[in-house]
Structure formats: C-alpha cells, structure tokens
Image (cartoon, rainbow, N blue to C red):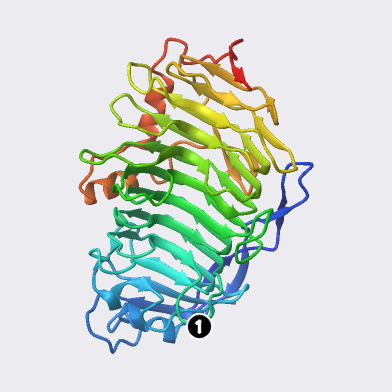
Amino acid sequence: MSLSRRQFIIGAAGAGLVLLAQPVSRYIPAWGTSLALGAGIKYVSNRTSPGGNGTLGNPFQVSEIWRNALPGDEFVFLNGIYKGATSMLDVAYGAGEGVSGTASAWITLRAETEGQVTFDAQWMYAPIRLAANQFITVQGFNACNSAEGAVVSATAFSSGTNRPCQWIQFKRICAWDAPTTTNHHVFSINGGTNILMEDCAGWGAGRKIFEVFNGGSGTGGGFGGGGATLRRCWGEWNKFGTTAFGPQHTFSISYWYTNVIAENLIGTWNTESGYSPNNPYDIFGHDGTASPRYVKLLGSIAYLRQAQRCEAGMMVFFPGYLGDVEVRDTVACIESGTAHRSIKPFLAGAPTYSGTNAMLDCSSANNGTLSSIATGWVTTNFAESSIPGSAATNMKRYESGVKTAQSLFPWPMNQRIIDGRRQSGRTAVDVTATIQELAGSGSADTTPPVRPTILSVT
C-alpha cells in the first residue's frame, strides 16, 4: 500500500511490561512500538493572530491546535521563537485540557528542526504544560522562563477534571529557568501515569530540575498507580531563592510516587554566583516522607568538578521509609582536588518499609568523605576509591530497566545541550568530554576502584 504525502506512520507505546528485580512483584510499562495510520500532518507557527488552517502556507496558531487535533495527527512547529500566551504549548490556552490520542494513534507535537523551536514564556506563562491528556508525544523543543508550575510538565490541572495525564512522552527537549521565589521546577511529572522523559536536559533556576511527584505510594496518596520512566536525561542545578519550600534536588526521582525507572541519568550541581540554596539535598534522591515503592536508579552518573560550587551534602541519597528500591551500575564521581571534601557520594538510610532495598555494582570516586550505606540495604560489589576510575565511560544503555550492549556515549543530546546552554546565556557543557575527562583524571584511569576496608556501613 502506498502512502500519500499527508499520511504518515507514528510510533506508539507498546503493550510490553518490564518486571522489576525479584522479589518485587510490580510492573512498569515498557515503551515499545506499535503502528497506526495517522490523520495527517498539520503545521503550526509563532503567528500572533488566529485563523490558521494547518497548512504550510497558513499554519495554526499554537492555541488553535487543540480544537483541531485528531488521533494520529502530527503537528509540525515551524522554526522560531514562540512568545505570548497563545503561542505557549500550554493546554490552558485553546481548551486543550483532556485532548488525547489513542493507544494506536498518538498525537505528535514536534519541532520542524530540533532545537530551533523555543517556547519563551518571558516569566509570564508556562511554556509546555499538558493536563488530563493521553497518548501524546512532545519532541524536539526548547522551553524556558516559566512563571508557573514548571517549564515542562504533565499534570492534573485547572477546570475541574483533576485527572492526571496518562501515556505521555517528552523526548529530546532542553528546558531551563523556572521562578526562584516559588515552589516550581524545570521538568515535572505531577500525578501522571505512564510518563516517559527521554533524552531531555534541564538546568538553571528552580527548586528541582527534574521532579516525579504524586503518583501513588506505599502508604497511600497520589492520583494513580504511578509509572514513570526517566531515560538518558542530563541535569544541572544552578539556582533558587532564599524562601524555604523544601529540599532542592537536581533529580527528585520519587516523591509520593511509585513505580519509577530512572535509567542512564547524568546529574551535577553548580550554584551560580549570587545564590545560596536554603535547603540543598542531592543530585539524585528522594523527597517526602511517604513510602514510595518499586523505584530503580540504573546506570547513572552523578559528578562534580573542582570548579563547580555545590552545597548539597550528598550526591546519591535515599533516606529511610523506602521499600523495594534498587540502585545499580551507578557512579558518583568527584574530581580530585581540594573542593567537595565533605560531600558523601552515596547515603542510604535504614529502611522502615517492608521490601528489599539494594545497592548493586555501584562505585564512587570520593574526595575525602566515604559513602554510608545502612545495614537494611543489600550491598553487592560496592567499590569506593579516592582515584577516579573508568567505570563511568564504560557504561551501557538501559532500555525499560534492561541493560543492553550499546554504549552510553557519545551522549545523544550533547550538541543540543551545548547549544541550549549558550542560548540560555550560560557556559556550554560538553557532557561526553566531561565524563571522559573525569574518568581519565587519575593515574589509575583504566582500573575500577577497589572497595576500601573503612567503608561506612551503619
């Protein structure tokens, strides 16, 4: 069968499921592929007036897409800077709350050229916000300068439905700068179910750079059964105000949320001049006092360079009141030098919730302070050294919780991060080169670190 120019095939999430490590008996959906014939390609621009019909010659205004969206549609956003309320990809404008695709015909919203479409909210709006939507892919954008809940979010929302998003994919998005004076973040999953953030990057202002929140927990709460995947995301915490809203994290992997896979994340912390966080916590960690369960941190890297400023006390932090948490193939690396002497690479508290918590095949290059792993954790092949090793550069990709043979490097969003950082007025970060330099900065750069006899196990 031949396809017309206006027909296309899109990917959708498959029906496969991934079993968490035994003895955990819960499941997280895998992101597979099924095929569906879409309704057509429609074009969107940064035009300031309504009246578009979705053709290339007369594209939609952003706020017009929601009442014209059909399952299977692909909306192509033409290159440019998008400003103003009706040019934000926010369902609050244009009656977009609840507009959805189907399991076999997702709605796709994508940039004409990756990194060449930027939603600049100018500190007045939310750049990218979905609410009560289902089966939507958002891909290839930049977003910045939010005035509301997050720069990029999937949430339950405004007009009384209070239903969470389900089956949403955010892919290849760079985002930066939420407000410094309110409890807002850069990327946020709030109450959503089956949400994927893949190949995304966040930095700048905000209490948290990535937050997974309110998706059910072992002690109740939350909108649904959870189910979130963060895959190959890079984050750097940069600044927040002095008002106390709670702990600050680069990645808050679980907060009243159950069933999370966080795989191949790379995180760091570098407080910008003129700012001092009031409650700095960690690069990877957990927030809240509820008992989330079935959380995995896999094949991830937390790093600090000597020139960076970091007030956080831990790099990887999981407190008590957790159950069925697995940290595997994860590296915490501090560049050798005089800075960051008091920061713990790993800190895991004594669990108070039934279930198995495990720290497996992890390693750290500390800079003076050893990790502390409570006796309630199963700890296997935990290696710690004062000399950086090559473990980080030898990492492999995970897909839906399963380790593959594919190398994690070169980092797939490397150039996008370089370009986006410059666009945001910040120093460029070459993620691939940074990890290579850290791994090669010690004399034993090809030798995995050795577990010391003085590892603190409490």
Q: Mark 1 Cα within 10 Å, few/some/many (few <14, many 20+)?
A: some
Q: Residue at x 61, y 33 (%)?
A: 349
Using residue 83 as the reference point, say whether residue 356 is left or right of it.
right
Residue located beneath label 1 in the image: 70
Residue 423: percent from left, percent from top? 23, 51
Residue 179 occupies which quadrant of the picture?
bottom left
225, above or below 106, in the image = above
Using residue 277 as the reference point, say whether residue 371 is left or right of it.
right
Can residue 167 be seen from the camera position used here? yes
Amino acid at the residue labelled 1: Leu
Residue 438 occupies which quadrant of the picture?
top left
383, above or below 156, in the image = above
Residue 83: percent from left, percent from top? 23, 70
Q: Residue at x 36, y 80 (%)?
A: 93
Residue 52: percent from left, percent from top? 30, 86
Q: Residue at x 69, y 40 (%)?
A: 352
